Structures are given as C-alpha cells and as structure tokens.
Amino acid sequence: MTEPPVAKFGLFIAGEEVEGQGGAGRRLLDPAHNRPVAEVAVGGRDDARRALEAAQAAFERPGWATDDGSLRAQVLRRLAAKLSESAEAFARLETLNMGKPLRESRGDVQYVARTLAYVSGLADKIEGSTIPVPGPRFDYTLQEPLGVTVHIAPWNYPLLLAIRSVAPALAAGNTVVLKPATPTPLTAIAFARLAHEVGLPPGVLNVVTGAGADVGEALVDDPRCRQVSFTGSGPVGRRIAELAARRVIPVTLELGGKSPVVVFPDADLDRAAKGVVYGIFGNAGQMCWAGSRLLVHRSVHAAFLERLASLAEKLRLGPGIEETTEMGPLVTADHLASVVGHVDRARSEGARIVTGGDRPSDPALASGNFLKPTVLADVAPTSRAAQEEIFGPVLVTFPFDDADEAVRLANQTSYGLCAAIWTRDLGTAHTLARRIEAGMVVVNEAPVTFPQTPFGGYKESGLGSEQGRHSLRSYLRTKNVSVHLGAPRKTA
C-alpha cells in the first residue's frame, strides 16, 4: 500500500523556495500517529553559505538597513495582520508537525502576531543621543544594525520562539538567517513565504533547514554572521558560545530551566493546583519554563498532591488536532523514550509515582508518542530527576517547613529561568521574588509572558533576554561621533 502524498517544503533563500543540497528530502511524522505529514528539503553547509550571502547582499542594498525605520514598521505591521488572517492554517500546521493541542497552537500564532505588531512600533523609534563634552565639539551617538543575524530555534514552540528573536532583529534593520529545529521546520518556512507575500525584500529573511552540526555550525562560524540567538539545550548553547567567542560576536542564549513552584498554605489551593497542572502539563511539559519542581508547605503537602493527581488524571490525552484534546503527544518517539527513561530511573532510585508514569492504555493512542501526566514524590532534591531538565509531563515534588527552606530548595539547581509563588501574603510574595534566583517570577498564576515583558534567565538558563522594549538592543551597536567645530569664524 502506497502512502498518500504529502506537502513539500523547501528552503527559503533570497525570496525563493529552493531545493536543499543536503541530500534527499526528509519525511516528517505526525507525533500523534507517526504518519508522514510533510516532506522538507534538507540543507547543508553550502545552503548555509548561500543564505548568508543572500542576507549580506540584502543588508548592503539601500533601503532596508538604511531606512529611518518607517519602511520596516510598515512591513512588520502588514505581516502581523496577514498572519492573523492566516492564523488557523498556521495553527493546524504547527499542531500536525509538533503535536501540541490545537488551542495551544492558536495561542502561539496569535502571540507571534502580537509580537510583530509590538516590535513594529519600535522600528521607527531607534534613536541616538547628544552628549555634552568639553571644548567646541558636538558629540552624538548612532544606533546601527549589526548586519546578518543568525537565529537557531527550538522545536517546542517552533514559530513563537523563532519569531521572538527574528522580529526585533528585523525591526532594528538587520537581515536574518533562521535555522528551525530539524523535527519542526514547517511553520518557519510557511512564515517566510508569508513575509515575502507582504513585501519583505528578498534576502532579508532566509530559512535553512538541516542538522545543527552542519548547518548551524556553518552559519555561526561564518564571518558574515554578526550575532547569534539560540534557544535550546545547554550543551549546544555552550558550543555556539564557543564558536561565537572565536570571532567575538554577541550571543543571546536561552538554555532551559528547572523552575520551582512554591505553594504556601495560605494560598487559594484549588486555584494553585490548576495553575500547577497548566504549568507542567501544558505542551506535554515540553517547555523551557515549565514548573517542573513543586515545593509545597508540609502542612498541606499530602492534600495538595491528591488535588494534583485528581486533576492530572482527568486531562484528556489525544491528537492535538482534535478540539477536545487537553494534552497531546511528545514531539518524537526518541524524545518519548528519553522522558520515560528519566521516570524509570527515578522510580528505581526510590521515587514514588503519585500518578502517571507510564503510557496510556487507550488503543487509539498506541501509535503516538503519548505519556500519562506524571507526578513524582519522595524524590531527593539532589537527584537527577530533581536537577535535570526532563522536558516532558513529569513533576517532582518536595515538602518544605518555612520560607527559608523554600528559598534554599528553589535555588538548589544550576538553572534560573522562572519561578512561581502561590500565597495571599504580599510580603511573602515580594520577599521571595527577590530571593529566588530566576529571571522571571510570577505570583498566584501559572507562568505567563507578553511581548512587552523581558524573557530571560539567570545562571545556566542563558545570557541576555528577549522581548520588551529593550529587545532591539541585542541587534544594534552604538557608534559615537565627535565633531570638533573649530574656533568661531571672524566676521568683517
């Protein structure tokens, strides 16, 4: 029996969709059934160089980089509007490729549209300053784009986390080469098509697929690359930082987390339980800022775990494309095996399975990459399950006795991306927000972010931040100009 035809996606270079030089096209599988959904071109080092060449030529042409920003603002606004019009198609494509529930993909696409609209308002407000200096001099600064910026995106929020860095880079006047994650490139390519339709000049946005060891390294190690933004794993982030350091170019790194959620006994426990469930089982736990370490005051610990287990067991698992699905599959069979391995190891080391821990029994889900929402108790705070980023629907839990112990446990990790605090006491909330080592803290809700709020972490969670009105700073350089005015001319 022959397989049904699937949509084909090429690389996007210099305003055209082209074949890759990295070998035969790669078939992508729907994570819910492991059936082919698309065929994508595979890029190689030569494609990376072609994309950089196209981006460099576009940067050097008059117009995009040299405009006062009004042209860029107009294009980004049109792109935001066009993406909103096409939101349903993009959401369905994201879900088919990555597996997350359709309602989550819809939210992601709308977030991208809001990001584009937000940064469009910054594009024509890039300003220098005048500086008083001694003598007859006029001193001022210019804010100039860097040139070609490279963006290496992850697979868990394929479009959202790509455009989170691409949008401000474009608004600042740079030209871009985007390398999407190997398993999930479809919405990035579709976005490049859309950008071309609304008038983005050829070569300003290029998309190259392919393995990180080939395409990614070729992009970062090329002298035309002037900045790198990467979201992904710590080991790959360190490798990118090493390559960038050789040429002394800036990097923005978002490298994940092991985020604590601290629940005090005075919190609204029903609301807190729902927030914890959303914060760890949303996107099947495949989130850099997932609230994956739960710290609950000992006086309510046992009862709170019962609440969590009840909510987790009610979550409806299924293909993301089905409207009633509340938690979808993991992105690939290999990633499912990795997450299951973490759970099995924790169990062998004495962890207690409060709920979940194995594959669902529903035969309709047997061919997909599904795992039950899992809650672990009796886990040592220094164990691998408590310290490593599992990146799946797995929550580890600990009791604490007072605020000092909660802070110690919260900070007992190499990461520092996000933290959540549940309490009705504002003094406790503000005190812990200062003491916990995290780039983002939320109080009395699940992790939340907006295009106008900074997103970045402490410690091994990365370098720099994205989003917010200062997001363009990563994609600009400051030039100082000092003009000696000379002595005043004598008049007759």
Image: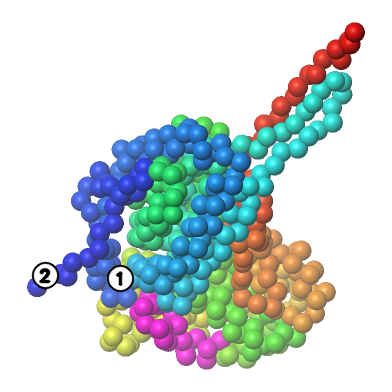
Query: Which segment did they paint magenta?
Result: 308-329
Viewer-closest of 37 and 203:
203
Note whether residue 384 is visible. no
Residue 61 pos. (x, y %): 47, 34
Residue 257 pos. (x, y %): 56, 62
Residue 264 pos. (x, y %): 72, 81
Q: Earlier in the sequence, mark 1 or mark 2?
A: 2
Name the residue rendered at 53%, 66% in the picture: 111
Task: Residue 268: name its quadrant.
Answer: bottom right
Viewer-closest of 423 and 66:
66
On whether residue 325 falls in the magenta region, the answer is yes
Q: Amino acid at mark 1?
A: Asp
User: What residue is pinned by disc 1?
Assistant: 30
Name the residue rendered at 44%, 37% in the picture: 58
Q: Please say if 141 is above or below 410.
A: above
Name the residue rendered at 43%, 44% in the picture: 201
Q: How is the image coloured?
A: rainbow
Location of the N terminus (image quadrant): bottom left
Residue 235 pos. (x, y %): 47, 50
Residue extending farthest to the left is 1
- Residue 262 as seen in the image, left or right of residue 190: right
Location of the C terminus (image quadrant): top right
Q: Please say if 297 is above or below 170.
A: below
On whether residue 292 falls in the magenta region, the answer is no
Q: Amino acid at mark 2?
A: Thr
* Residue neighbourhood size for the residue with mark 2, other residues' Cα within 10 Å, grouped as few (<14), some (14–19), many (≥20): few
Viewer-closest of 52 and 331:
52
Q: Secondary structure at mark 1?
A: strand
User: What residue is pinned by disc 2?
Assistant: 2
